[in-house]
Image (tube, rainbow, N blue to C red):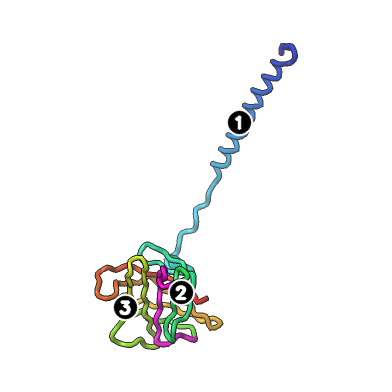
Amino acid sequence: MRYCPRGQHWVGLQKKNMKKLLLFIASSALLTASCSKKEDPAPATPSTPTTSGIPANGWKLGTVSYTSAIVAKSGANILSAMDGIPSGSSPAVNSLNVYFSALPTANGTYSIVKYPSTTSLTATQIGVTAGLYATSTTYSTTGFDGINATVTVTGGKIKVVIPEVWVKVTGGGTDSLKLTGTVLEQ
């Protein structure tokens, strides 16, 4: 190699080679990472319907999900969930209410029936309503699904898991949506 005054040529060659070397290392690392083998997950085995689409602490009405900010007993037979803390004379919260003949004290399975109805709820039935503040609309269970809700009581706190059911606008409307959720008393 030819020597240049003050080693400028030699330094220039070192910088060029260093840039090439760094570029080579970076591209090699990228190629190595992108060529890794990914294992396919095991195929799912057929099973009974799961609750994987049910929110853990809230409800889904149609395509909109709501997270419970507060869940509490209301009166002698209602478990209420709200997506906000109501305040003032006009509470801007959406709600989900689960109606029992009497609040449960033990675990059980409850048939989800039409609510409100002309007949009273039995000890093994619940009715569900979902209220939307923005539109002042209330949706109620139709009871046509033949679906059961699972109720668990732990330390006096009630948890209701509602699989996907049809709800319809209360008061004769034609709008209907699917509802699913978990109401967990806090």
User: Which kind of residue does numbered mark 3 sit on?
Assistant: Gly
Query: Which segment is the magenta one?
Result: 86-105
Residue at image coords 27%, 68%: 175
Which of discs 2 and 1 lies nearer the camera? The answer is: 2
Which of discs 1 and 3 lies nearer the camera? The answer is: 3
Q: Where, by quadrant of the figure, is residue 132 drawn?
A: bottom left
Spot occupied by residue 70 in the image (x, y as percentages of width and height)? 49, 73
C-alpha span from label 1 to label 3: 67 Å
User: Which kind of residue does numbered mark 1 sit on?
Assistant: Phe
Dot 3: element = loop
C-alpha span from label 2 to label 1: 57 Å
Q: Earlier in the sequence, mark 2 or mark 3?
A: 3
User: Which kind of residue does numbered mark 2 sit on?
Assistant: Val
**Residue occupied by mark 1:** 24
**Residue occupied by mark 2:** 183
**Residue occupied by mark 3:** 143
Is 144 left, or right, of 182 in this rendering?
left
State yes or no: discs 2 and 3 in contact (Cβ < 8 Å): no
Q: Is residue 92 magenta?
A: yes
Dot 2: element = strand
Spot occupied by residue 74 in the image (x, y as percentages of width and height)? 44, 81
